[in-house]
Amino acid sequence: MPQLADGGREIFDALIVGSGATGGWAAKELTEAGLSVVLLEAGPETTPDQFAEHVPPYAMKYRDTRPNGVTSPEVARLRPMHAQQGACSEVNYKWFANDIENPFTTPAGKPFVWVRVRALGGRTLTWGRQSYRLSDLDFKAASRDGVGVDWPLSYKDLAPYYSKVERFIGISGRNEGLAHFPDQELLPPMPFTCGERVFKRAVESRFGRPVTIGRSAVLTARHRGREACHYCGPCNRGCVTYSYFSSPFTTLAAAKRTGRLTLLTDAVVSHMTMDRATGLASGVSYVERARRRVREIRARVVLLCASTLESTRILLNSAPGGLANSSGTLGRYLMDHMYGATITGRMLGLGRAKPWHGPPRRPNGIFVPRFRNVTQVHTNGVIRGFSYQGGAGPRFATTTAGFGEAFKRSVHEDAYWQASLHALSEGLASHNNFVELDPDVVDAWGIPVLRIHMEWGGNERALFRDSLEQGAAMLETAGAVDIRTSDRPKTPGDGIHEVGTARMGRDRRTSVLNQYCQAHDVKNLFVTDGAAFPSLGSVNPTLTMMANTARACDYLLEAARKGELG
């Protein structure tokens, strides 16, 4: 096994920064192909003894409550931004980045939310697990509506890699036979609730819009040695049966089994190192998280998989004006899904509602694929579209007035069926949404931080209004009453689907990476996480990140075999 290259003895075949969805896939693919690989993670090791999915609220010090949106004083003190996120709780908060040690800045009046997990596995420890393919409606969107740029690949190019990822990680759901919502390699679907069946029949009959169960990276059958989900509920706290996909216990576990993976945790990467004679990347410089010692490690190929903004931050810190930035587009075209369009209503005619606070809890919901601008280009005053996630189930009447025994009785007796929809609207690529280095602020390790400039544009706001109107109409068709809609979108970044800032493209004058996520300017440098996205689409992006990484690794291996990487 190669030794750590401290000023340079051994050189690894490949170096990966980041251990999440894409870093895990790169490690698996490259080690299984016979390469020696070193992977650097900024946070500590993740072990099953940290999991808390079976810890009941009464066993927690603060009872898993969120007064004023905060789970505990400790979380509020060290993670004031992350404390506002539903996935960050008093039992898993140490996985999330310490906001005091890891700051970022924004201009006045342009807030942004940057959710970071600094632990082995990254955000695959706490993600929502919804896993969908993009289609050529997304990959070639610019050719249809003239906005932004096309991806430098098509659905046909990525389809085999989607299948490869799905077969390995395990995704449950139903196929619907729609070209713009491609079928996938799926395990058996989770069941609908009674209310969801009513909603599905009504919407499909009245509008012709398919309603399906979510496609989730949660097992419904034993798969590759991992057990089926037992519906305990809070997946963002870990899973002792490894029933949901997280990289430490699937892709990274596979890479470890090869004996060719060297794992460095608590390694905070600051910048790339370069060979001045060749113009190639030679490795990275990093800081040991606890001891603050600066180290260097070398490799023949470098893959940045640190998450969209962190990978771009590393590139910006690696050279004046940013490494691999001859196009001037590095840091530009930041995107996220606009969240916050929520529609709820009470469903009638389903009999007495009997809610229950404990498990079993289905870790999934329903999904309504995009229907706006599928056959047309620009309808209802909007470009592109949105999808919905949601569900219908019994709810306690917690807003009932009163106290004491009568109150407790009414909470149960007045329980009702509630349906809800939450829209994901596509954010368009805009040159004005960008990140840069803040010249005055550094993190706890002395590394310059990002200054993030992002705000919603007119089309995102139009999609928001359209999604509220359409969602309310669908609930009304399903017989819901007391329909309520939210009145404002969430802050950019709150969707936790941030992509862009080092986009792929065929033209090196307008993009950072080629169609295989290889930097135009540095041929042994690859960026395979969400930074590579030229556009976002209207579904969750993580599955596409993993498929794109698998495709990039195939190309990397072939290019290395031919001696084309330096």
Image (cartoon, rainbow, N blue to C red):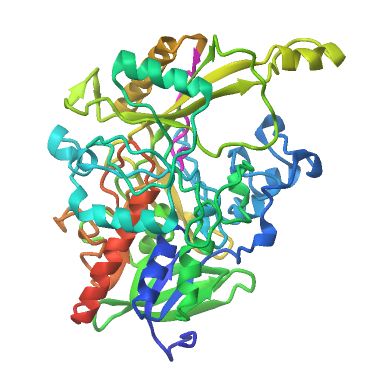
Q: Nearer the viewer, residue 131 or 67?
A: 131
Span shown in magenta = 484-496
Q: Position of residue 38 (x, y in %)?
A: 45, 76
Q: Residue at x 38, y 71 (%)?
A: 272
Horizontal side, residue 73 vs residue 172: left or right: right
Q: Position of residue 460 (x, y in %)?
A: 33, 28
Q: Position of residue 324 (x, y in %)?
A: 27, 64
Residue occupying the far right of the picture? 404
Q: Residue at x 59, y 46 (%)?
A: 235
Q: Is residue 399 above or below residue 262?
A: above
Q: Position of residue 289 (x, y in %)?
A: 59, 68
Horizontal side, residue 353 vs residue 550: left or right: right
How many badges with numbers are in the image?
0
Q: Is residue 16 above or below residue 244?
A: below
Residue occupying the far bottom of the picture? 9
Q: In the rendered image, which quarter is residue 143 located in?
A: top left
Prevailing secondary structure of the magenta residues: loop
Q: Answer yes or no: is residue 27 visible.
A: yes
Q: Residue at x 38, y 47 (%)?
A: 186
- Residue 492 magenta-highlighted: yes
Horizontal side, residue 12 vs residue 432: left or right: right
Q: Nearer the viewer, residue 112 or 205?
A: 205
Q: Nearer the viewer, residue 14 or 115?
A: 14
Quadrant for the C terminus in the image:
bottom left
Q: Is residue 2 above or below residue 303?
A: below
